[in-house]
Amino acid sequence: MVQGLIDPRDTLERQNEKLLKIAATLMRRVEQDTDSSGLAYAQFERAALLEEEVRNRTRDLERTLDLLNLSNAKLAEANRETEAARANLTNAIEAVQEGFALFNAQDVLVMCNSRFGMHMPDLRDHLQPGLRFDAYVTLVSQNPALALPPGTTTADWALRRMTRHQDRSVMFNVRLHGDLWMQISEHRTPDGGTVILQTDVTDIMRLQHQERERLLDDQARLIRATLEHLNQGVCIFDTQRRLLGWNRLLGDLLAIPVGRFRLGSRFETILIRLREDFDFAGNITANEVATWAKQDGHRPALTFDIQNPAGRVLTVFMQDMPDGGFVISFTDVTQERQSARAMSEAKETLEQRVLERTLELEDALAEAERANASKSRFVAAASHDLLQPLSAAKLFVSALDGELPTGAPRDTLQKAANALDSVETLLEALLDISRLDSGRAQVHLAPVDLNHLLQQLMEEMRPMAEAKGLRLRLRPTDHAVLSDITYLRRILQNLLSNALRYTQTGGVLVGARATRNGLRLEIWDTGSGIAEADQTRIFGEFQRLNATASAADGMGLGLAIVDRACALLGHPLSLRSRLGRGTVFAVDLPRAGNPQPSPPPRHPERSGDPLSKLIVLLVEADTDLREALSLTMEQWGMDVLACADPAEAQSLIDEIGLPPDVMVADIPPTERPATARAMAALQDKHAPLPLCLISAGRGPQTQAVARQLNVPLLAKPLNPEHLRRFLVAQSPRAIL
């Protein structure tokens, strides 16, 4: 077969050559063998087919050759363009006025221009493609043209250069010998390679140095001018303690001739002058100054004074400078020191006068305090001594009330009773003022049932209101407040009585309203009002706006007591008033928790005479008051065992062998603890023995004794009705 004669692996030229050779052979055989027509025809046919195949293969070969020629042409064009681009890149790099080098991502040199390493000629032969970056750095560090910084070895420089190579962008200056400077810029390419630019900055660095020197010269002139305008003498020394600069005033202050100041003079020269002409003040010495100047490193600032025989005083300030030198300033403080001495002398004289005056004031203050304390003691003692006979007088008057017939005698007795009540009110006010002014008043803060306290006061004040035809109203409140019940009662009692006293028509209203921080208790009246100019004056002692009022209407101490008591308790007191319309007094009180439950009021209803044959043990040291109390209680039908002290009381009980039903005992202010123990002993021995204490003392100590014994306390002068109410409550025949 013809197909087997051709090897497909041969080239087209080889295949055509074989086909032509086969066709020629077949044609020659056809021409030689004409006898065998059938075979000849077959061979001819094969020859024709082979010729057709040759033509087809020839056409394919021609097309392939055309394509190959076209590819070769394009490749040649690409090679020409590549060579042109390489030439252009080379020309461009070469045209750059800076040294240029490109390292690939593996830190291998790809190309560089002729200016790269321009100041290191012996390095040029090594800057060939394929050079590694670390080898390049080693060559540069060992090149003689490189001027290494002081104290830096070639290995140190190479290590720092390789360390900076890790950054994406690097720029630094390199100093070369011959006063040359090269700026190195190193940047990363997107594929991880490195581009290095070397720029000669010698001219720029020289200009900078020249500019710096010019600036230094300008600064020197400026500093010189500044030093000359200072009002201090100044000198500057370098690290070797050599004089660098000074001003003219320094020579004037130190009296050193100008010729003695020379640039480079040693510090010791000036120190010698200071030793000769000046004395060092304080704890500093010239040797210590010399030691300070010789120190290396940081030196703390040094300040001291020097003085010459003429009396001139200079303050010296020595300050270290960053370069190791130091500066010294001399300030003339002669006038300041003289002024200070004059002021010190004046101060001493003034202090002496102030001390003398202070001692005089202290003596006067002590005398005033002694007088005030003496006054307070006198008022307290006098009031106490007056309360005893006053109580007796009231009881005697009360005893006569049931025995005198109606008419003039009884009216006279009533007037005497009213006079005694006025005296009692005045004494109580004096006692309150004395106690509050003494500064020894004690308070006992506790929850107070405000509504219960107000109800009691309303009952006490209602007769006074009804006598004047006034309406007395109370708006109940269910709040408890934190206060001292004794002082709070006194405050509200004085405010209520003051409102009723100065109200002629209308009435008085008492109410409480809640505030953000507590409760505000207000007392409204429809009186004549208080002028604004008088609203501060009324809180003074013995101040009454109605000058025509009688002593029975008070002595003007009620509001003074209210003001002091509110200040003591910390209860703000306020006042609003309009002339002709009335006045409102308000006291701000803090809220408290649940108050202690008040004992239910007892309203004894007598069945016959509940006090009849009731045995009362009376312990009272004052003879007149003991007799008055005995007479009063005997008129009520009771049997009274009167004694002067607890010991006599115990002896009397032991003698008659009959225990009392109730005990009424006085507490002398000077014997409170002993009396309290004696009363407690009597109660324990004859328990149950109801006890009621009576006392002219109204202070916290007396109240503490009553709380300790858990018994009621009646204040002198005694109100007979209060005493009777207590005795009726203790009677077995009282119906509660």
Image (cartoon, rainbow, N blue to C red):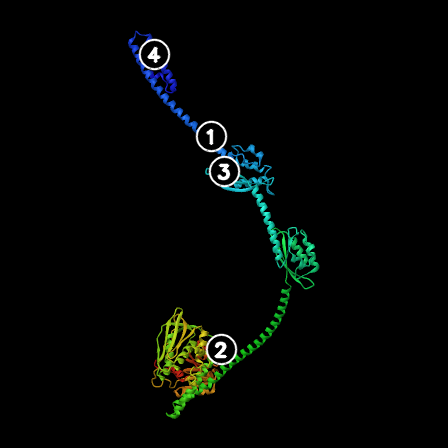
Q: Amino acid at mark 2?
A: Asp
Please tell me whether mark 2 or mark 4 is closer to you in this view: 4
Label whose residue precedes the other's in the sequence (3 or 4): 4
Against 302, is 439 above or below?
A: below
Say the numbered circle drawn on residue 133. none
Image position, residue 250 (x, y; %): 65, 57
Of the numbered discs 1 and 2, the one sitting upstream in the chain is 1
606 or 450, nearer to the observer? 450
Query: Which amino acid is tagged 1?
Result: Glu
* Front residue (pair 233, 725): 233
Query: Which SS class for mark 2?
Result: helix
Q: Which residue is mark 1?
A: 83
* Dot label at residue 26: 4
Is tag 1's residue or tag 4's residue first in the polypeptide sequence? Answer: 4
In the rendered view, tell whether residue 29 sits above or below residue 284: above
Give the distance between the C-alpha atoms of the residues marked 1 and 2, in whole angstroms: 117 Å
Q: Is residue 725 above or below residue 569?
A: below
* Location of residue 517 in the rendering, given as x and y in whole percent from the top left corner: 40, 69
Q: Residue, x 41% and y 90% (percent of image)?
A: 413
Residue at 31%, 16% (x, y): give it.
49
> Callout 4 environment at 10 Å: few (<14), some (14 to 19), or many (20+)?
some
Q: The disc labelled 3 sits on which kind of residue? A: Thr
Q: In the rendered structure, find residue 194 and report the number of the disc placed on it.
A: 3
In this view, the residue farthest toward the left is: 38
Tag 4's secondary structure? helix
How far across and how far down the image is residue 683, in percent? Answer: 44, 79
Q: Nearer the viewer, residue 318 or 105?
A: 318
Looking at the image, is mark 2 or mark 4 earlier in the sequence?
4
